[in-house]
Amino acid sequence: MAKKETKGNYGAESIQVLEGLDPVRKRPGMYIGTTGLQGLHHLIWEIFDNSRDEAMGGFADDIEVAILPGNKIRVADNGRGIPVDIHPKTKVSTLETIMTTLHAGGKFGGDGYKFSGGLHGVGVSVVNALSKKVRAVVHRDGAYYMQEYENGGKPLSKVKKMGKSDKRGTIITFEADPLIFPKIEYDFKTIVNHLRQQAYLVRGMRITIIDAREYPDDIKDDKVFYLRELPDIGEASLLSKVPSQTFYFDGGLKSLISFENRHQKPLHKQIFYIEKEYKGQEGQQDVHVEVALQYVDDISSRIVAYANNIYNPEGGMHVTGFKTALTRTINNYVKKANIKGIEGNFTGDDVLEGLTAVVSVKIQEIQFEGQTKAKLGSVEARSAVESVFAESFAEFLEENPNDAKAIVGKAVLAMRARKAAKAAKDSVLRKGALEGMTLPGKLADCQSKSAEDAELFIVEGDSAGGTAKSGRDRKTQAILPLRGKILNVERARLDKMLSSEQIKNVVIALGTAIGDTFDINKLRYHKIIIATDADVDGEHIQTLMLTLFYRYFRELIERGHLYIAQPPLYKVKKGKNILYFYTESEKTEYEKKHKGALGADDIQRYKGLGEMNAEELWETTMDPESRILKQVRIEDAREADRVFDMLMGKDVPARKTFIQNHAKEATIDV
Ligand code: 28F
């Protein structure tokens, strides 16, 4: 697929800003973010990006990345090869200039590669600056050339012509400098995951990743172009002895959609795909737009966004344009098609349910928001994506009525669910409002009316609830028992659960209302404490509760109002004294210290809250003086939300594995 050399005929002249490499070694963080493992891997991405840019320009289609013994990294591409001609003024080769000067290269001159990541494309000179040793080999014009650099990029000699070659391309091998990087340890998985994403972005580009760190023999890597071609002693090839992975996606972004949906059930056959160059109007830049999408049988949505092949986890202008166009196009289609019984007028959220999409744009002068490039700021991307996508997606819906039907059907479901959920929320609200101070009958409220002092214990099971009621400090502690097994709702939407009596009780007890009318000032307890047994059922109730709070009361978590009680696992009587152990390791630790002394005492293991009497429950779990509470962090709740989706989701194999891995004792029917 590699095209002929047609554009960007730049020689040494197009290099503009010249600066030595000292600044890079002085402040590596400015160039690669950190000198930790992330920064270390960043070195690979920098070198790889240049190979990928060659491929994106149509000049290369085969890239090999290898980790060599001694933690050397070797990257090879079959592009045009970095020019080695001597610049008439500086008397230095282009290769040496690129390797030893900062900000050199076509990327910054504007007439080199058409698109680049901008800020991060600082390139190979940064890698050279931060390496102990680098070797650059270039094959072009019937010969191959080499130059080596040491200790932060100092050339050992001029570029040397080594001999004849019928190949084309560039091979860079580097050894990160231990003076800069405290820990040099590459992670094969991290490299594979990053490069897989990249492979989707350039259709038809092959990427091979080889982990040859443990290769038993000497690697004569200067004798071959690709390491995988290295002839081995005996029969076996190098690749049969070490881990390796190859990516090649003929479908580009379409392949990425299939990959993202690999555990999902697609709702329609065709994956939508468009690629188009959007001509900028009146002084605006051109924007290259690529979008692919497919709907699956799922509630959530996944939009993966890239700008100049840089992943934007927080989206940005391109995603905004995409969402606007998606809503408008589907609504227009429904209106035009005049489908019976469908009222249309979907909201943005309705058409997002079940969506998997990739939006990728390329712009010459790119702008990101913030330092990390997590979000695309270039405004021209919004109108470009909006216009290109709206036009071609409308065509897609017209031309593929079956796919269109499935997509519209999904949006209808989402809209109904949204309306039902709103009705359920409203009824929760109405109930709370109508009955005013009439709190759920199950709630044993506290006397204090000041929320700062008040605590709500959400306790698993009626019997433990009863014990907690008699054990509590009724001045400040309220108890709301929850019946077990509330999770046994087949594929429940949380929305649906809001109509369950149990969950309603929680919501009413909180006092804040839910959804649009949520008001944190009405919160009745500043500590909300979930108390469940240490078994599978308890774990599930915890998951459900955390998910409920994560989705509908996130602010309560963010403000640190949500806690998990930690009841003890063991009680030990030692003469008059009573000891409680809250973890297995506390117990073994104690046993070690006292040489198995516990054998003589009567140890009691608590299986559930209900096994404690009121006094014990107070002492161990409820008394603010002696109890242990775990404050729920937003990450804990996010993880619970993920687990909840897994338990309720349609990815049956994933759900099964998950349950098998987690259900040690009880049988659960989810
Ligand atoms: C293993 C890493 O770095 N591959 C690269 C090229 C090809 C050209 C190039 C690179 C020249 C003046 C900047 C060749 N012929 N792999 C790589 N392949 N850089 S980096 O040119 C750099 C410009 O300023 C190349 C004609 N044009 C460009």
Image: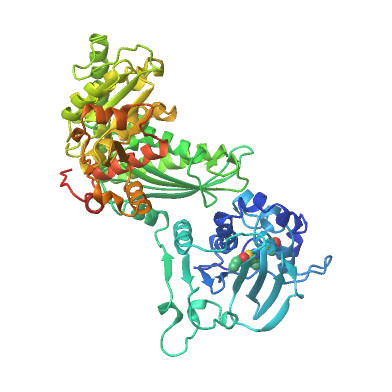
Asked where in the image residue 244 lies, by quadrant, the reply is: bottom left
- Please provide percent x and percent y for residue 582: 32, 41
Quadrant showing the C terminus? top left
Q: Is residue 108 above or below residue 546?
A: below
Q: Residue at x 64, y 58 (%)?
A: 123
**Left/right of residue 530 with respect to residue 86 in the rendered view:** left
Q: Residue at x 18, y 31 (%)?
A: 461
**Left/right of residue 116 with respect to residue 478 in the rendered view:** right
- Residue situated furthest front in the rendering: 575
Q: Is residue 51 above or below residue 581?
A: below
- Please provide percent x and percent y for residue 421: 25, 26
Q: Is residue 118 above or below residue 431?
A: below
Q: How many marks?
A: 0
Q: Which colour style is shown?
A: rainbow
Instruction: Indicate the quadrant of ligand 1 in the picture.
Output: bottom right
**Left/right of residue 409 with respect to residue 135 in the rendered view:** left
- Residue situated furthest right in the rendering: 89
* Foreground pick, 166 / 605: 605
Examine the rendering and report whether any part of residue 275 can be seen: yes
Q: Residue at x 70, y 65 (%)?
A: 99
Q: Is residue 300 above or below residue 456?
A: below
- Please provide percent x and percent y for residue 609: 22, 34
Q: Residue at x 54, y 41 (%)?
A: 376
Examine the rendering and report whether any part of residue 342 can be seen: no
**Left/right of residue 124 with respect to residue 23 in the rendered view:** left
- Please provide percent x and percent y for residue 432: 26, 14
